[in-house]
Amino acid sequence: MKSQSRTSGEHEAVSILYCHGWGSRFDPSKNKIRALAKMRPVAGITVNYTMHP
């Protein structure tokens, strides 16, 4: 992996992918998700772990 320099003010577009499962679903109104959203945008998915791939 090569290092790259950036000029001041340049930002990466980074989001948080939140995978949720085990008997509940992704809920953007939950405190944990709202706290994460203060740092970065949060995209969420609900994973059904009882389904075989």
Image (cartoon, helix red, strand yellow):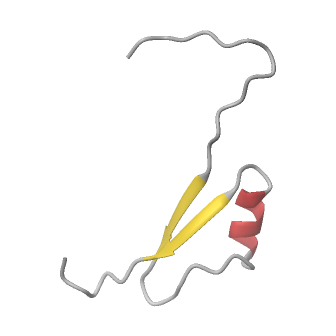
Q: Is residue 11 above or below residue 29?
A: above
Position above or below: 36 against 45: above
Q: Is 1 on the left-hand or right-hand side of 20?
A: left
Residue 26 occupies which quadrant of the picture? bottom right
Residue 20 to residue 24: above or below: above
Left or right relative to 16: residue 28: right
**18 sits to left or right of 30:** left
In the rendered image, residue 53, in percent from the top left (x then y), is placed at: 19, 77
Across and down, in percent, residue 15 comes to: 62, 50
Which residue corresponds to the image point at 36% horizontal and 83% vertical from the top-left?
A: 48
Quadrant containing the N terminus in the rendered view? top left
Q: Nearer the viewer, residue 42 or 20?
A: 42
How many marks overall? 0
* x, y percent for residue 22: 42, 83
Which quarter of the picture shows residue 18? bottom right
Residue under the image location 61 percent in, 9 percent down: 5
Q: Residue at x 76, y 62 (%)?
A: 35
Image spot of residue 13 (x, y percent): 64, 40
